[in-house]
Every structure is written in C-alpha cells, then in structure tokens.
C-alpha cells in the first residue's frame, strides 16, 4: 500500500504512471466528488483504477469491502496520507488500518524539487514544478502494520518525512 502527500499529487501521477507501465492492478482511493472525477479520468489514462470513497453511512460497507480486497488482492493500493481536505501533513489512519487488516506493508513517497511554485493560498500548498526542475521521488517503507503498532499512531507519524 502506498501513501503520498496531497500537495504532491501531480508528481504522484507521474510515479503511478511509471509503476503502471510495469505492474497491472493499481487502485487509488479518491473522493466521490468532482475532484475525484478529474483524478479518475487521469488514472484511467494509464490503466489505474479509482476507488471512490463514499460519504456518511455508506462508508462502513465500503470499508469492509475494501479490507477484503486488500486481503485477497495483489493490487497496489494508493491514497493521499493527509486526505482530500487536510490538514497539511497530518496523516489519516485509513491506509494504515487497511494495511493492518490485509497484513500488507505500507510505503510512502515524498518528493524534493529544485524549482517549484507553491500555491500558498491552498491548504495543501499544492506544488507546480517549473520547467527543467529536478524532481526526486523517494520511497520510504514503514513496514507491515498491525493493530498494536497503529495504537501508537504518533510513533508512525514521527517516521514520516515531509
């Protein structure tokens, strides 16, 4: 399972496109709103699938189904660590709980840029790489998740590099 920071979503699309060229079966958790529609169209271009996160009461059966998919599937599941609405660099537990239930490893990707524009008026400080910018993607493994480890979620948060 792979996580990334929301503001880096443009670069994450490039990484997922690269992974999709070598591995079939990538699913990315996205919201069920218009932003999710845009992301889904982008994902479909390179063979990845959007998993639409429902609101309210529909969340419980969705989560149950997603846990079962995680247990039985060899597909790569990706999600923004800080969720669709933030706050910035404040990870949500969803991806970690799914990994725990499925007995899978969690890795996350963070980016370093040589030259970018940051949209400071947005909660996620969205990043737009400038032409000829050098972008470095770093993959960090957090290992397998279990319930005991998730109980000390603050320790997991401290491992994350922004």
Image (spheres, rainbow, N blue to C red):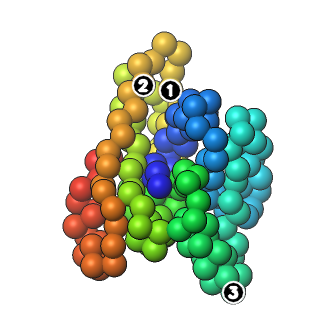
Of residues 136 and 22, the one nearer the viewer is 22
Residue beneath label 3, please? 57
SS class of the residue under badge 2? Answer: strand
- Tag 1 or tag 3, which sits nearer the N-term? 3
Residue neighbourhood size for the residue with mark 1, other residues' Cα within 10 Å, grouped as few (<14), some (14–19), many (≥20): some
Mark 1 falls on what kind of element? strand
- 64 displayed left or right of 110: right
- In depth, the one of 106 and 103 nearer the eye is 103
Q: In the drawing, does residue 126 fall left or right of residue 39? A: left
Dot 3 alpha-carbon crowd within 10 angstroms: few under 14, some 14 to 19, many 20 or more: few
Disc 2 designates what residue?
A: 135
Residue at 46% in and 59% down: 82
Mark 3 or 2, nearer chain start: 3
Can residue 141 be seen in the rendering of this structure? yes
Residue position marked by numbered label 1 in the rendering: 129
Q: CA distance from mark 3 to mark 1?
A: 39 Å
Residue in the image at 59% along x and 73% along y:
68
Answer whether labels 3 and 1 touch (C-beta < 8 Å). no
Viewer-closest of 128 and 47: 47
Residue beneath the point at 38% across and 57% down: 105
How far across and down, in percent of the image, does residue 3 sit? Answer: 45, 52
Residue 143: x and y in percent read 30, 57
Q: Is residue 134 above or below residue 8?
A: above
Direction from residue 139 to residue 43 in the image, left or right: right
Are discs 1 and 2 less than 8 Å apart at CB? Answer: yes
């Amino acid at each position: 399972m792979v996580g990334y920071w929301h503001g880096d979503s443009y670069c994450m699309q490039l990484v997922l496109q690269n992974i999709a060229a070598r591995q079939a079966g990538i699913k990315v958790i996205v919201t069920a709103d218009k932003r999710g529609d845009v992301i889904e169209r982008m994902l479909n271009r390179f063979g990845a699938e959007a998993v639409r996160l429902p609101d309210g009461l529909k969340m419980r059966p969705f989560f149950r189904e997603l846990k079962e998919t995680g247990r039985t599937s060899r597909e790569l599941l990706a999600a923004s660590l800080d969720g669709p609405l933030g706050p910035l660099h404040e990870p949500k537990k969803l991806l970690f709980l799914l990994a725990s239930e499925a007995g899978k490893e969690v890795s996350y990707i963070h980016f370093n840029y040589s030259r970018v524009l940051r949209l400071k008026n947005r909660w996620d400080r969205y990043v737009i790489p400038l032409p000829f910018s050098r972008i470095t993607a770093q993959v960090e493994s957090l290992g397998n998740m279990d319930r005991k480890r998730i109980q000390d979620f603050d320790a997991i948060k401290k491992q994350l590099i922004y």
